[in-house]
Every structure is written in structure tokens, then in C-alpha cells.
Amino acid sequence: MADHAAKWTRSLAAAAARARALDVGDQEAVAELGAGLEELWQSVPDGLPGVGSLMERCLYGLQVLYQGGIAQPADLAAAISEALAAMLGVADGSNAAPNAMLREADRLETLLLASEHERGMAGTDGSEAPAAGEAPAPEAVPASLDDVASRLVLLEGDATEEWTLLQAALARLVPGLPRPVQDVLAPACVDLASFLAAGGDGDALRRELGGALEQALLLLEEGGPANAQRRRPAADAKPATAEPVAADVDPEADHVESELPTEIVLGDDADPEFIGEFLTESNEYIEDSEGALLTLESDPQDMEAVNRVFRAFHTIKGTSAFLGLDAVSELAHKAETVLSRVRDGEIQFTHQYADLALRSVDMLKDLLVRLQDRAPGDCIPLPADFANLLFDLMHPESAAVDPSTKKRDAAEAAAATPRADARAGMEAAAGEGAAAKASSRIESSVRVRTDRLDRLIDMVGELVIAHSIVAQDEVVDEGRHHDLAKKVAHTGKIVRDLQDLSMSMRMVPLKGTFQKMARLVRDLAVKGSKEVQFQRIGEDTEIDRNMVDLINDPLVHMIRNAVDHGIEPPDERAAADKPRQGRVILTAYHAGGNVIVELADDGRGLDRRRIVDKAVERGIIESDKGMSDTDVFNLIFEAGFSTAARVTDVSGRGVGMDVVRRNIESLHGRVDISSRLGRGTTFSVRLPLTMAITDGMLVCVGDQRYIVPSLNIQMNLRPERDNIATVLKQGEMLKLRGDLLPLYRLHRIFGISGAIENPCHGAILVMDDGDVRFAVLVDELLGKLQVVTKPLGNLLGRVPGISGGAILGDGRVGLILDPAGLSNLARNCQSSGSECAGAVGAVT
Amino acid sequence: MMETKAEIPAVESAETDAAIKSRVCKGGKFLTFFLDEEEYALEILKVHEIIGMMPITPVPRTPDYVLGVLNLRGKVIPVLDLRTKFGMEKVAWDDETCIIVVQINDRQVGTVVDKVSEVLDIANDDIEDTPAFGTEVNTDFILGIGKSEGRVKLLLDIDKVLTSDELAELNAATAPAEA
């Protein structure tokens, strides 16, 4: 061994001498020296730490020299010569300090790097260069950070040479990296150098370096191609054949654009249909992921929830990239990257990540809305926040300082720890979610266009009518053909099943809406520094799909009211002997052909006194004499009514509850309030199962039949002569318990002949339309019925006084009266004093 | 107009949708029907179906030629009386009276006619422009006059019938009342 070392040292001395005298222009001499060094490199004796790797750098340097094309070949040659001298000093013991070698290594490295840059710019591909037998590829030097990292993993703690190699690699790579990455790596590099110089705990160093590398890699990955390109030349300049790992092209790097997009451009070939489908699909995913995120916030360990969100982003990313919606796919990609780290257990899903993810979801929603109804070739500006969000997604660790969170932090500071409690409060919902998760199976479904579905429902309705006509046919009905009657009855059962089924096809569960409300409660609670536990019960209750969207608004207002006005701040609650955490419970269930949605809170409750005072002040009422609690509470539905002492950006403007009542009434529903001061308030919304079905009263006038919506009928009566009074011989009034109501004759308004003229022989319906009450004379009430409202067709547009048509039991069309239009019409008729009967076409 | 039409070979009678939509009167298949003694023709592609008379529910406060609405297998569609629309006198309905359901875009409208006659091809060459009758006669609804088997058929511009001013006025008059 000693012989070998001595011999090697001699060879090295010779090589060093040759290097000192090297003529950089003489390619043959360079190649010869290279061959000699290669031999030396392959036979480095034991006990010479760092020599191997430095030798390798020298070899590489010679290779560069051989290929030429660098500005200062003499400098490089000198560096190589110095390096060899330093090695010689170590090998023969004349200068045992490894520092000299390190210094030389650094110098060499710098020069090599510079040469690589030069050659990179000149477009020369270094990988083609070396002839066989010439200086071989120094394969041992890691060429990228990934390589360094993988090398590090395999590294033995005390293998100094390997450490040196790593250091060399880092020294070469680091200057080419972006500043933040350099900063990350710098401390580890310093430690590495001191380790090599003085020794120390290899394992600790490995951990440190590993951590730094990981962080650096992540930064690079998120930093996009600008960085990727900067680290690429280093790899490219290496002989590619010898560097299998260097070829590892980061697939993401190509995907990301170096500049942030500022708008979405729809390509000319963008297919609106595709985009439409993409929007529908994405909206579903977004809704789902929103729910999952809320679950996740309360239970960060719920990997299924992470996966759900992950899948959502992933799918959106894929589809949007396919459609060329770069901004969307970019955002989805970034969000996905963050989530993948959560999924892989790299980071804990804290509220900071939840905010980030929710912000991404909101941004996606925003983008999707902007994409709606765009034509190919359109440019869609991106929201102002877009760039910020992308940045935060790239640096999720620092995103905590985003403005919304700051605000939240302030709120947190102000109100002890509402957050944690609020989150704990979500647990109930989450527990429920977990149970649902366990039981939920993936149901396969088919997307059907709504018009087809409506058509199917129409057809089934017709089938029912056609069947009843057959069943009532005298041949079937008279009882002589027993078998036929049995068969018809059997068909009848099938038809009824079919009808039930077809009606249920329009029904969707309220789950989606309820999930949105959970999000709302969370946000409101945080904003208002309240602690709120939100519970959802019966979210599988089904309701007509057209109504799902329509109940959204009223629910939002009710929830705002409950959280903002109802639930007290935690301290106030504690003072009132209530749990600090408020409860808001949203319940849905079926009852008597209706859907009931209840929103209960255990907050302040409504203060009768204050409502009355406010109402008197606003002149809505004069006093509360004779008013029941319900009457008083209903005052809060008046427009502009708010008892809130201060207006927040959430509520207190007195708009909300007014909207609630209007919207719910437009859905043919009703809202009731019950409340106990200090104990809480419950809003109960009663909605029909479907908008399509109207409860009505069938009335006849002359030979015509009309349907009056039950909702608008207050009462019906047969008047006495005394109850009718005329005004100026033109207008008629109905005296009803001291009230005077205008009396309209339907046959006059609609110009129907053959109707009963004497009110005492006909029937009078007292109808109301909002605040207006009036009485309508018809011939006869034929009975109650439920009908499916259908439009009269575009051609006729809106006919005054008629809100639509419906197929009656005998297959004919019955017209549904519109009370508002009717009273307008009647007033117009009377004011103009003219005969208001419109022209009626030929009678059937 | 006429010259260009004449140049198109008669073979073109197999029409494309686009050609129909362009509302240039061209040859093709027509459904013919009678109103009084006159024979009218309607582009066959606009005819959805032909049904016999069925109960019609009058809609109050609509023009007199709007007979009302009927139930077409679960769909409520309006029905017009072409006789009234064209200022002819009313006649009692009989077994031959029927309703041609016309489909334009997504809307269907029923039109009551005295009787339907046949489906026939009318070549481009057999179609002539509507002669001008002066202001006395309103020929707005006539696209052209087709000749076939020695008889004259009035090619009806059904779109115009259905989008005529009176209906537009009706809708316009309705709108403010609703507000």
C-alpha cells in the first residue's frame, strides 16, 4: 500500500509539473495530461480525503480546455496546475492542510462555471466533445440538486471524500441558483466546509444539508422555469451520456410559464360547449372540495378529505389545460402542489393552509364565473388578486402574512382564541361528515338535459290523464268487463309509480346548499369574532332542483342575521351564563307535502320591546296594542327595518330580512319566526316540494274555467245583498267585517259571456296580492287541485291577469290567474271607464 | 332576385336547412291547405305535425285571431285562426278542419285551417314573385306564388304571420302593465 501511495505521489508530481508547463493551445498535450490524470484519478490511494473529487474537477477542466472556446484558457490551466500542486502537497505530506486544496477546488470550480456559462451562451454543446480515451466523463460529480440530494441519502457519515464531492457539486451549482435558493443553502454549505476542514458530527450535517436541499428543491420547483433554466446549463454542459440523472427533466418546469398571465385568452377554436361542460363539472368539484376543506380544517388527519380536494384541483387542472385556459390550470396546479404536500404528510394542514386553499377555491370560482358566456377569442382579465394568490401558493409558509389572515390574527388577538373554539365547533359537523362518508357509496349517474327531463315529466303527466280517461270510459267503468277493469287498474298502478318516479327525478338533496352555509358561518364567525358551532341536520332532504338555487339567498340572509345579530360575543354569552360557543342549527325535513327548513340559534333572541320601539319610530305601526308576538316579530321583515345598533358590512342595513320574506314568498313559501328573549330565535321556512306544482282552486265563469292559486286566496263567501255597495254606479265594493274591498267581476274583466251577473248567486273569492286585498266574483268554485304550471308559449308573451296554463284532469288547458295582474287590469278598466272585455276568439 | 333564382337549376329542390332559413323563396316540398277557396302552401320543414280539432281554451284579452291555447301532449301551445288573421269570415268547423302545428326555432304554434290538401314539390321555375295589388291588398304574408298542376298556391311566410306587428304590440302593451 505504501508503495502504491509513493508511486502515485510520484506520478502526481510528474503530472503537476506537466500541467505547470502546459500549453493551452496544444490539444495533444492537453489530451496527454488528461489521460495521465485519469489514471491517477482511478487509482487514488486511501487516506487522501477530497483528492479524488478535486482530481475529477481537474479532469473536467482539462476536458473544457481540450474543447476550447473559453475566454481565459490560461487561467483555467493555471488553476488546474495549482490544484494538482495542492493535491501533491497533501499526498507527499509537505502541506497537509486540506484548506489549500479546498481553496484550489473553489477557484477551479469558479472558472469551470464561468466557462460553462460562456459555452452555454455560445451554443456549444459540451456533451459532444470528448473523444474516446480522452478525459472521461467525471460521472461521479452530481450535476443537479436532485443528484446532490440523492447522493446525500446514500452517503456514509464519515466518508470525507464523498462529502468533498458534494461540496464541490454544491459549489458549482449554488451560484447558478436563484437568490432565495442560495440563501437556503448557504448555511449548510458553510457547515459543510467547516466539517471538511475540522471534522464533526456527520449525521447532524447530513440532516441539516438534507433539510436545506429539500427546501431548495421545493423552491425551485415552485419557482418555475426561470430557475429551472438557470440550473439546467450546469447539467447540460456535462456529457449527457454519462449523466443519466441529469436528463431528469422536471415535467412541471415546462408547464409553468415564466411570466404570470394577466388574462385568459379563449382560443378561436375554443368550443363553447366544452367550456360549458367544463364549467358545470368544475363547479361541482369546487363545491365538493369546499365541503372537504371545512372538514379538513376540523380534522387535519382526514386524508379522504385531502384527496377529495386534491382530485378536484387535479381534474380542473387537467381539463383547463386541455381547453387552453392557462390561468385556471396554473392556479389549480399550484394549489394542487400545496395539497400534495399535505397529502404526503410533509406539512400539517393548519388554518393558514385552509385559508390558502379556500382562497384558491374562491379564486377558481371567480375565474369560472368570468369564463361564463364568453365567445371564442375573448380576452378575460384576471382578478387583481390572482398574482398574489399564486405567489402565496408558491410560498405557502410565508402566506400567513396575507392581508386577510392578518385581519384574522387581529381578530384572534382581540377575542382570545375564538378560532380554535370555532374550529372545535365544526367538529360536530365533521363527525357527521365522517359518518356520512362511511355510509356514502359512489352512485353512478347520468347527466340529462333539463329540457328532456321536463319533457319526460310532461309526457308522464299526459299518460296519467290519458289513463284516467281510459279508466273512466264507460266500457271499463260499467262493471261488465271485469277482466278489462282489472287490467286497466294494473296499468294505473304502473302509471302512478311512473309519475312518482318522474317527479323525483327533478329532486336534488339540499346538501350542497347546506355546505355553502357551513362556509358562510365559518367566515362570519371569524369576521365577527364569535364562537359558533354549526350543525346541519337532514341535508339529504330533497327539493326541486330549480328551488335549490332560489333558497340560497334567503338562507344566506337568515344565517347572517343569526350569526351577526343572534349569537352574542363569547364574553357576553359567558356573562349570561351561556356556553361561550353559540350554536346555529340548520335543519331540513319533509312535512305534509312541504319542505321545512329551520334555522335555529341560541343567541339573544328577538327583543319585542326594541322591535316595537323601532317600528313606532319608523312609523310602521302606531303601537303594539293587540299585536301578538308573532305579529311583532314579523315586523322585522319590513323593508329597511333593523334593530342593529351598528351597521356592519355583514348586516344591519335592514335589507336582509325583507329579502328573505320576498324571496320565500316568490317561491310560494312562508316564513315564521319564534323567539325567546335571551334564548334564541328560530326561523321556519315552509316551502312547497316543487315550484312546478301550484296548489289551486278551480273556478268556473260562464263556460270557462280558471285556476286561482290557493296561496292568494284568503277566503271565499257567498255574499248577501247588503254586503255589496256601489260607488258612483261604477265601482263595486264588498263589505267584509268592517273592511271595504273592491269587488271585481271576472267575467267583465275577461269579457266572458253567460256568467252569473248577480253576486248573490255566485261565489266571491277574497284574494290578496301582497298588501292589496280585493274580491273577485266568479260563478262557482269547482274544487281544489294541484296543477303543473306551464308557460303559454312565447307567441303570446305575458297575458295580463294570467300567469300560465295547466293541463286539467280532462286534458284541457286551464288558465292560472295572476292576482297582481288581475287587480291591475281591473283598476285600469275601471279608471278608463270603458268596457274592458277584450276580444275573445271563436268559441270552441 | 328573380334572375338569380332562375339561374339555380331546378334539381336543387332538395333543400338545405340553411336555404330555408335564408327565407329566400325557393322550390322544395310544400304542404298545401285550404282557406276558403284559396290554396296555400307551407314549407314542409316548418310543419311539426297535423292534428284534428281539439278543445281550445280561449285566452282573454288577446287579439281575435288568437283562438287560445291547447294541450299538445303535455305542452301548452297557442292556436291561431288563419281565417280571422287574413280577414276572412268565420265558418263552422267540420271534420276536415284541422290544426297545423308549425315549429319555428323552439316554439310551436297551432294554426287552424279549413283542410289540408297534399304535400307536393314546387320547382324554383314554378315560383313567381307576388304581384303587387297596390295598397288595397296586404300581401306581406305571401312569399311567392307557386304553380303546380295548373293551380295556383300561395306560398305562406309563416314566420311573418307569427311575428306580426299585432302580437308584438300585444307584448309591448303587456309589459308596462306588468311593471
Image (cartoon, grey):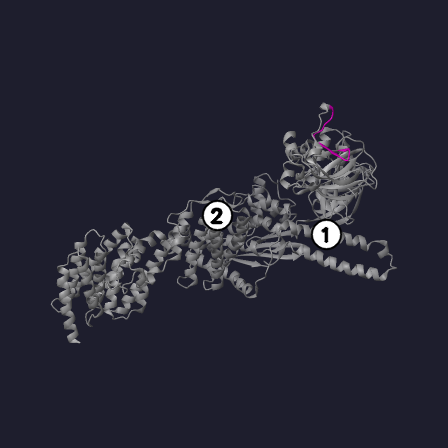
Q: Is residue B93 magenta?
A: no
Q: Amino acid at mark 1?
A: Gly
Q: Split into 4 quadrants, where in the image is the C terminus of chain B?
A: top right
The foreground one among A171 and A132 is: A132
**The furthest residue to the right:** A480
Q: Is residue A688 above or below residue A792?
A: below
Q: How many marks are shown on the rendered structure?
A: 2
Which residue lies under the disc numbered 2? A367
Chain letter, disc 2 residue: A
Q: State left or right for residue A342 relative to residue A706.
A: left
Which residue lies under the disc numbered 1? A461
Chain letter, disc 1 residue: A
| Spatial separation of the CA atoms under disc 2 and disc 1 | 41 Å
The picture quadrant where one finds residue A89 is bottom left
**Residue A136 shows in this picture:** yes
Q: State left or right for residue A326 relative to residue B39.
A: left
Q: State left or right for residue A260 relative to residue A132.
A: right
Q: Which residues are magenta?
A: B136-152
